[in-house]
Image (cartoon, rainbow, N blue to C red):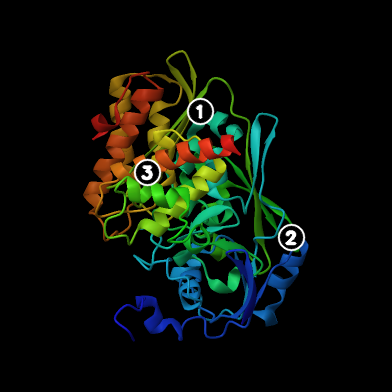
């Protein structure tokens, strides 16, 4: 090895990785992809953006099914809602006017803050949901916006985000099933939404994020969904905090109480990056800051959240 | 496994290892402008343009780029006749150790192809995945603005 040869740490083990991989297929239709993935003998695994797979490839994979040529790269407006194809790169959400104008811009804001421009060109909407990590961003907002997930396989099924995130998607997606579309419902005019995430640097993985969607008439909170992501791999709704706010007149006391309850109620898994107490503190600050902004109409600068 | 891809407008049929990344493949093929920095999509030193989009080549398995079109800095200019972006980087003092420069230039090229007159914020956003530990970014942003002005002027002339 010359002094100037690039030496990747991955290379030391590269020969051992994906040792069984024999081929990569590029189906052009969903039906074709499902057919390949359903075949038990082929041991095939679907690959969308492929970012997470590079780091943790399944060693037993014999065939990769690239979803890059499927006609699932689209963003469509429909009856005030959105339909987004599973292989749409996150970067396309950022450049889409339809996404920016939907749901108080909460989906755009989330997409815009996922990794860097270079990462967003690779990460896909479907991949981000199906292969979640504790820092994955999209799932929190998908749950808060009550989106629907379309799954196609031998039989097609539609799940609500709530059903989808009860278990890790890899555990309940059957062999040959693919997430093909995310359906965002219409966002009524009296609804408000906001998303905040805490990272140590702008492009860093989030330590915690919170999405809140609420319906207001005047200062009365008619309906609310509070979702916390990053405390566990799957996003979680904070039902008791929601209950404190529902059908009540918004006030600082109520907001403080709801954020306190949210911080106490969330489950927090072990995270090498920070302590459980720290995450609970973050949760309290983020929930309070968002509610002050969208329920009490206060202008809360980002630095003041913490 | 054998794949066919286009690198710098040249079609290439190559044998790739199952776990080889696009970064490793490009360097093996002699495109040494593509640098190994972090290997995890955080630094942008390995940036190439794939099908018109700037991407981290360290995050892509080579076996999955069959039929794709990849562009590296080698396609932009030569020492004798550098691309306007390359000369703008030199003139603006945007190159110090030079390790991040190919990635910066590819990210900037993808931006200017899409948006010939970017604002400062748009330049910052386009380069948000490219780290430079030497220059402090001010000169890099200035270089992209300079190149944008020159490319526009050249387009008008033609």
Crowd band around label 2 with a 10 angstrom C-alpha radius: few (<14), some (14–19), many (20+): some
Which of the 4 image quarters holds residue A13?
A: bottom left
> Given the image, what chain letter belongs to the residue carrying mark 2?
A
Q: Position of residue A291 (x, y in %)?
A: 37, 27
> Which secondary structure, mark 3?
helix
> Which secondary structure, mark 2?
helix
The answer, for residue A238, to whether it is visible in the render is no
Q: Which residue is mark 2?
A: A30
Measured along the vertical axis of the image, is residue B9 above or below residue A102? Answer: below
Residue A97 is left or right of residue B84, and the answer is right
Residue A128 is left or right of residue B43, and the answer is right
Give the foreground label among 2 and 3: 3
Crowd band around label 1 with a 10 angstrom C-alpha radius: few (<14), some (14–19), many (20+): some
> Given the image, what chain letter belongs to the residue carrying mark 1?
A
Q: Which quadrant is home to the C terminus of chain B?
A: top right
Q: Are marks 1 and 2 on the same chain?
A: yes
For residue A274, the mark is: none
* Residue drawn at point x = 48 percent, y = 34 percent: A106
Q: Which residue is mark 1?
A: A104
Closest to the observer: A259 or A20? A20
Give the foreground label among 1 and 3: 3
Q: Which residue is mark 3?
A: B143
Q: Are marks 2 and 3 on the same chain?
A: no
* Residue drawn at point x = 29 percent, y = 31 percent: A302
Closest to the observer: A280 or A10? A10
Verify CB contact (< 8 Å) between mark 2 and mark 3.
no
The residues tagged by marks 1 and 2 sit, at their Cα atoms, a distance apart of 32 Å
Q: Which quadrant is home to the N terminus of chain B?
A: bottom right
Name the residue at the top extreme. A218
């Amino acid at each position: 090895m010359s002094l100037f040869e690039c030496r990747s740490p991955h290379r030391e083990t590269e020969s051992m990785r994906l040792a069984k991989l024999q081929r990569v297929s590029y189906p052009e239709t969903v039906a074709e992809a499902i057919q390949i993935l359903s075949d038990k003998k082929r041991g095939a695994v679907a690959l969308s953006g492929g970012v997470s797979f590079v780091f943790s490839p399944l060693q037993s994979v014999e065939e990769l099914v690239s979803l890059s040529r499927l006609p699932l790269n689209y963003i469509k407006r429909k009856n005030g809602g959105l339909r987004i194809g599973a292989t749409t790169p996150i970067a396309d959400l950022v450049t889409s006017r339809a996404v920016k104008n939907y749901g108080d811009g909460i989906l755009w804001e989330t997409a815009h803050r996922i990794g860097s421009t270079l990462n967003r060109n690779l990460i896909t909407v479907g991949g981000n949901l199906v292969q979640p990590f504790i820092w994955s961003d999209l799932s929190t907002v998908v749950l808060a916006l009550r989106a629907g997930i379309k799954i196609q396989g031998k039989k097609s099924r539609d799940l609500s985000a709530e059903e989808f995130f009860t278990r890790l998607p890899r555990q309940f997606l059957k062999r040959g099933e693919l997430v093909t579309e995310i359906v965002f419902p219409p966002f009524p005019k009296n609804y408000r939404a906001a998303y905040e995430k805490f990272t140590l640097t702008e492009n860093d993985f989030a330590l915690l994020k919170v999405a809140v969607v609420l319906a207001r008439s005047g200062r009365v909170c008619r309906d609310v969904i509070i979702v916390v992501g990053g405390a566990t791999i799957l996003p979680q709704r904070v039902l008791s905090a929601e209950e404190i706010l529902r059908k009540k007149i918004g006030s600082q006391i109520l907001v403080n109480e709801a954020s306190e309850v949210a911080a106490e109620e969330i489950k927090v898994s072990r995270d090498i990056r920070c302590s459980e107490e720290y995450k609970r503190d973050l949760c309290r600050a983020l929930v309070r800051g968002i509610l002050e902004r969208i329920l009490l109409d206060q202008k809360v600068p980002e630095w003041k959240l913490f | 496994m054998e794949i066919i891809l286009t690198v710098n407008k040249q079609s290439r049929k190559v044998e790739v290892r199952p776990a080889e990344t696009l970064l490793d493949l490009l360097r093996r093929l002699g495109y040494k402008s593509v640098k190994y920095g972090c290997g995890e999509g955080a630094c942008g030193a390995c940036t190439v343009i794939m099908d018109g989009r700037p991407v981290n080549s360290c995050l892509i398995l080579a076996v999955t780029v069959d039929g794709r079109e990849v562009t590296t800095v080698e396609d932009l200019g030569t020492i004798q006749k550098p691309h306007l972006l390359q000369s703008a980087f030199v003139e603006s003092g945007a190159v110090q150790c030079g390790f991040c420069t190919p990635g910066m230039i590819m990210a900037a090229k993808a931006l200017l192809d899409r948006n010939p007159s970017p604002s400062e914020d748009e330049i910052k956003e386009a380069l948000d995945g490219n780290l430079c530990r030497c220059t402090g970014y001010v000169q890099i942003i200035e270089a992209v603005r300079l190149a944008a002005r020159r490319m526009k002027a050249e387009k008008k002339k033609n």
